[in-house]
Amino acid sequence: MFLIRAAFWLSVAILLIPTDSQTGEAPRVTLVNAFLAAKATVADLSAFCDRNPDVCVTSGAAFELFAEKAESGVQMIYNYLDTPPEPETGAGTLRQDDIALPWKGADGGPA
């Protein structure tokens, strides 16, 4: 989780860096160049498991464990929210003698 947060904040910091100070313009990327780069990235990622089968097996097992923990957490939250609260018994600070006293109004007489 630390690596994901670090990557996110590093990306935000990079996006805030000003453009080239000499020209004042950011380098332009055409739609075709962006599409070709995305296509090459997908092709490289699809062959990743062929090059590193152990990493894929381990990351698959880690993802399954993560999914099980997430499902368990959601189930715990659902059970907590679905269960009605139980009434408190004997949790007050008044004793039975205090409760049994008759009520007196502001003038000291019965209400």
Image (tube, rainbow, N blue to C red):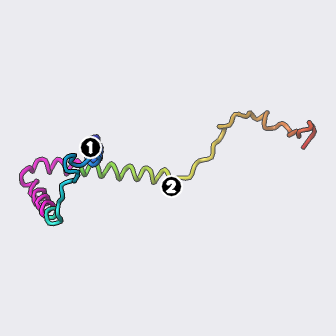
Rendering coords of residue 45 (x, y %)? 13, 56
- Which residue is painted at 13% across and 62% down in the image? 33
Whole-number angstrom distance, CA of label 2 to CA of label 1: 40 Å
- Which residue is painted at 65% across and 41% down in the image? 89
Vertically, is 32 above or below 49? below
Tell which circle, 2 or 1, labels the residue nearer the N-terminal end.
1
- Which residue is painted at 92% across and 41% down in the image? 110
Along the line of sight, the residue nearer the viewer: 102 or 29: 29
Q: Which residue position holds label 1?
A: 10
Assign the C terminus to one quadrant of the image: top right
Q: How crowded is mark 2: few (under 14 residues within 10 Å), some or many (20 or more)?
A: few
Rendering coords of residue 26 (x, y %)? 21, 53
Q: Is mark 2 on a helix, strand or loop?
A: helix
Q: Which residue position holds label 2?
A: 82
Vertically, is 78 above or below 4? below
Q: What element carries label 1?
A: helix
Q: Which amino acid does label 2 sit on?
A: Asp
Rendering coords of residue 24 (x, y %)? 23, 51
Along the line of sight, the residue nearer the viewer: 16 or 75: 16
Q: How crowded is mark 1: few (under 14 residues within 10 Å), some or many (20 or more)?
A: few
Q: Which span is picked out in magenta? A: 36-62
Vertically, is 10 above or below 40? above
Q: In this view, does 89 lie to the left or right of 10?
A: right
Q: Residue furthest front?
A: 22
Q: Is the stretch drawn in magenta largely helix, strand or loop?
A: helix
